[in-house]
Image (spheres, rainbow, N blue to C red):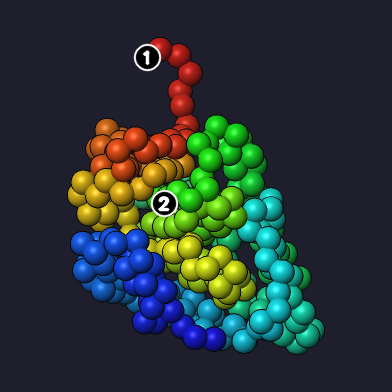
Amino acid sequence: MELPDDHRALYQAFLDQGLTTWLAKLPEQLARGLDRQRHGDLPAWEKAVAKLPALPAERHVQLDSDTLTVELALSDSQQRQCFNLLRKLAPWRKGPFQLGGIHIDTEWRSDWKWQRVAPHLAPLRYRKVLDVGGGSGYHAWRMTGTGAAFVLVIDPSPRFYWQFQAVRHFVGDADGGRTQFLPVGIEDVPENLGFFDTVFSMGVLYHRPSPLEHLQQLKAALAPGGELVLETLVVEGDR
Ligand SMILES: C[S@@+](CC[C@H](N)C(=O)[O-])C[C@H]1O[C@@H](n2cnc3c(N)ncnc32)[C@H](O)[C@@H]1O
């Protein structure tokens, strides 16, 4: 497989979207986010994705289904090889996925959250979307599947970055490159970006040392009139 070493698709997407100020920061942000010193297993994740075999071009990709599914014909040995490589990226927290007949039974049923959230959203069709703390990218693929023009996941976890790249290997260019992942945190989004039509922050607010600052950062990433989708734990009552 071609490794996303040169991050060509990511750079191209930023160029196409006119995100030029942020584009200039990408080399440093990618180098920092994927620095092998960050986690002892990082080289193994990188290698596992690089070793995924070339896949048949003919495939059926369902991004907007509860189990993100890529149907393609794999030989038994290819399937075994993919299974062993995908297992090196475990734990798989957010999903589920079905990739070339391999079911990834993730720790969380992220489709359940999506079912609760989706009815309340302004339609995502043609929108530019930021998913802050998007984990493996499961929800981002769902957003692309409903017609978003551009979906960017930011999440500082390098494991999730490599899980996303593994799924990308199966999805191929079925999404037209509209779904991208940058391994950084919300604090790395350029100030006062004012760009995204919808910004998601799901399951992140209560992790942030300053929830109010998090809200301000989310607002600053939104275009005027954009929609913030904030999903978080709440404490019942009026205290
Ligand atoms: C509870 S998970 C929620 C994942 C997903 N959004 C969901 O709703 O299922 C919180 C995520 O926030 C990410 N995260 C942690 N610090 C972050 C930061 N500074 N900026 C953005 N994301 C962050 C974590 O890596 C993790 O993937």
Q: Which residue is drawn at 54% across and 80% down?
A: 48
Numbered tag placed on residue 194 in the rendering: none
Dot 1: within a 10 Å radius of its alpha carbon, few (fewer than 14), some, or many (20 or more) residues? few
Which residue is the site of mark 1? Answer: 239
Numbered tag placed on residue 128 in the rendering: 2
Q: Please, what secondary structure does the residue beneath circle 1 have?
A: loop
Left or right, 12 with respect to 105, comes to left
In this rendered view, identify the residue nearer to me: 131 or 86: 131
- The answer to whether residue 56 is visible is yes
In this rendered view, identify the residue nearer to me: 20 or 142: 20
Res. 96 image quadrant: bottom right
Between the residue at mark 2 and the residue at mark 1, the CA separation in whole angstroms equals 36 Å
Left or right, 87 with respect to 80, comes to left
Total labels drawn: 2
The image quadrant where one finds the N terminus is: bottom right
Q: Give the mark nearest the N terminus, 2 or 1.
A: 2
Left or right, 183 with respect to 121, comes to left
> What amino acid is at disc 2?
Lys
x and y, in percent, of residue 232 in the image: 46, 34
> What amino acid is at disc 1?
Arg
Residue 30 position (above or below residue 187): below
Residue 95 position (above or below residue 198): below
Q: Please, what secondary structure does the residue beneath circle 2 have?
A: strand
- The answer to whether residue 159 is visible is no
Q: Which residue is drawn at 46% across and 27% down?
A: 234
Q: Residue at x 37, y 14 (%)?
A: 239
x and y, in percent, of residue 128 in the image: 41, 51
x and y, in percent, of residue 39 in the image: 38, 70
